[in-house]
Amino acid sequence: MADFRLQTERLVLRSWREEDIEPFAAICADPLVMATLGPVMDLEATRALVARECAFEAELGHTFWVVERREDARLIGKCGIIRGRDGPIEGKPEIGWRLASDCWGKGYITEAARGCADWFFANRDAESLWAITSLGNTRSRAVMERLGMLWREELEFAHPRIVPESPLLRHVTYELPRAAWATR
């Protein structure tokens, strides 16, 4: 399979490489980044995560790809689409992202997610893209809303892989119907 590459105005989304693990591990070890996602990750946990991303791409033809800035080729996060594994979006196309904290507030993830949604709706036949996040993850929820995703309040759930006493337990669900994307 050829390496995936999608270019937006300021970003490149691409397949993972071995040399991406250490810079991505720095992002996953940042307590600010992981505050709404789960515990900070060490190098081996990040290596396992990247291996899962590569397996998703091999199976589905898409994954949460590397996001790098075009201006300096710096890896600043990940964004893309996998098959949902939990709650009401299990088995459905799930868009998601993670971004280095020093890159927050610059519109990078909204730009990357728009590129992913464009790619997905042009290349796959699903009727909706889905997203989940912890109830208090206001940054990700704002991105979902900028994409035109609809908050499906009735699909709030307790994430099955998060311990019950965690403040991250409650998750919200958003949907982006193909028809809404086409008419934006």
Image (spheres, rainbow, N blue to C red):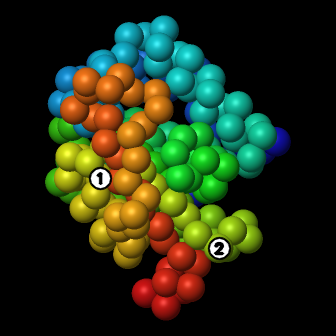
Residue 69 seen from this side: no
- Label 1 neighbour load within 10 Å: few <14, some 14-19, many 20+: many
Q: Residue furthest bottom?
A: 183
Residue at left 58%, top 78%? 178
| Residue 128 shows in this picture | yes
| 64 or 92: nearer the viewer | 92
Residue 8 at x, y percent in the picture:
46, 63
Q: Is residue 161 above or below residue 148?
A: above
Type of amino acid under label 1: Ser
The quarter in which the C terminus is drawn is bottom left
Q: Residue 124: which quarter of the image?
A: bottom right
Q: Position of residue 180 (x, y in %)?
A: 49, 84
Q: Quadrant of the N terminus?
A: top right
Circle 2 is placed at which residue position? 127
Look at the numbered disc 1 and give the secondary structure of its residue.
helix
Compared with 103, 37 (above or below) is above
SS of the residue under disc 2: loop
- Which residue lies under the disc numbered 1? 140
From the viewer's side, name the closer residue of 160 and 52.
160
- Is 33 on the left-hand or right-hand side of 7? left
The number of callouts visible is 2
Q: Residues within 10 Å of mark 2 (few under 14, many from 20)?
A: few
Q: Is residue 103 left or right of residue 47?
A: left
Amino acid, disc 2: Glu
Q: Residue at x 22, y 32 (%)?
A: 167
Residue 44 position within the rendered picture, expressed as x and y whole percent measured from the top left:
48, 8
Where residue 119 is drawn, which disc sits there?
A: none
Query: Which badge, 2 or 1, is on the more N-terminal residue?
Result: 2
Question: Which residue is located at x 35 percent, y 64 percent?
Answer: 153
The x and y percentages for residue 148 are 38, 75
- Using the image, determine if residue 169 lies above or below residue 61: above
